[in-house]
Image (cartoon, helix red, strand yellow):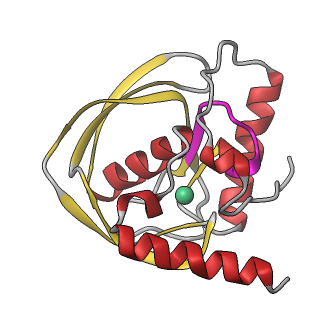
């Protein structure tokens, strides 16, 4: 087990689409375990493989993220391989959405309220489930990462431009 470095915008791997996982081999299993550990260490409620520089379609999330009575000492995560949104409905505002790869920035983001997810679990078993509310937001945010999309691509052009300028300026000052 190891904590991996979380990359931040505008790192290249965050902005490119990830490829499907063909075989759940030892490397993928190790990646998943490391991602779970890295996510809880950050701490965050979800993490996608491009955030640790691996462009393969794997996400992890805090299994208890949607539980309002969640006990922070319990660290259980779920991994999804090749996750896809196969159905969506409703609309919800994700308040102050943030990302471990987008430093010092949060924004409200419009998301679907319900999504149906199809994926493989860590054993390679096909699974399908419905996610609502917070879990639906996490699914959309993390699956976006696998397509090279950060949440700042889903806010207004004005807000996005301001954020990108701020980052460019910070980098110039280094
Ligand atoms: Ni993120």
Task: Name the residue: 20% across, 60% down.
Answer: 92
Task: Name the residue: 82% across, 54% down.
Answer: 4
Say above or below: 96 vs 59. Answer: below
Q: Nearer the viewer, residue 30 or 159?
A: 159
Task: Name the residue: 73% across, 57% down.
Answer: 38
> In the picture, residue 164 is in which quadrant?
bottom right
Residue 1 image position (x, y, % from top left): 86, 46
> In the picture, residue 104 is in which quadrant?
bottom right
Q: Is residue 41 visible?
A: yes
Q: Nearer the viewer, residue 110 or 133?
A: 110
- Is residue 58 in the magenta section? yes
Q: Is residue 78 visible?
A: no
Q: Nearer the viewer, residue 55 or 40?
A: 55
- Assign the C terminus to one quadrant of the image: bottom right
Q: Nearer the viewer, residue 93 or 72?
A: 93
Q: Quadrant of ligand 1?
A: bottom right
- Is residue 141 in the magenta section? no
In this picture, which residue range is highlighted in magenta?
A: 51-60
> In the picture, residue 160 is in which quadrant?
bottom left
Residue 14 image position (x, y, % from top left): 64, 49
Residue 109 image position (x, y, % from top left): 32, 65
Relative to residue 118, is residue 82 drawn left or right?
A: right
Q: Give the residue at the far left of this rendering.
A: 90
Q: Give the residue at the far bottom of this rendering.
A: 173
């Amino acid at each position: 087990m190891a904590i991996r470095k979380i990359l931040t915008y505008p790192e290249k791997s965050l902005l490119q689409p990830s490829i499907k996982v063909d075989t759940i081999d030892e490397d993928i299993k190790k990646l998943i375990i490391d991602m779970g550990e890295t996510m809880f260490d950050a701490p965050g409620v979800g993490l996608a493989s491009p955030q640790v520089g691996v462009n393969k379609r794997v996400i992890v999330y805090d299994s208890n993220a949607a539980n309002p009575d969640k006990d922070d000492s319990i660290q259980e995560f779920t991994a999804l391989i090749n996750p896809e949104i196969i159905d969506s409905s409703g609309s919800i505002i994700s308040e102050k959405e943030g990302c471990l790869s987008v430093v010092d920035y949060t924004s409200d983001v419009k998301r679907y309220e319900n999504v149906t997810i199809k994926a493989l679990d860590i054993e390679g078993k096909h699974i399908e489930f419905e996610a609502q509310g917070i879990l639906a937001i996490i699914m959309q945010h993390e699956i976006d990462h696998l397509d090279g999309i950060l949440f700042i691509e889903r806010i207004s052009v004005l807000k996005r431009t301001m954020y990108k300028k701020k980052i460019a300026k910070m980098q110039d000052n280094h």
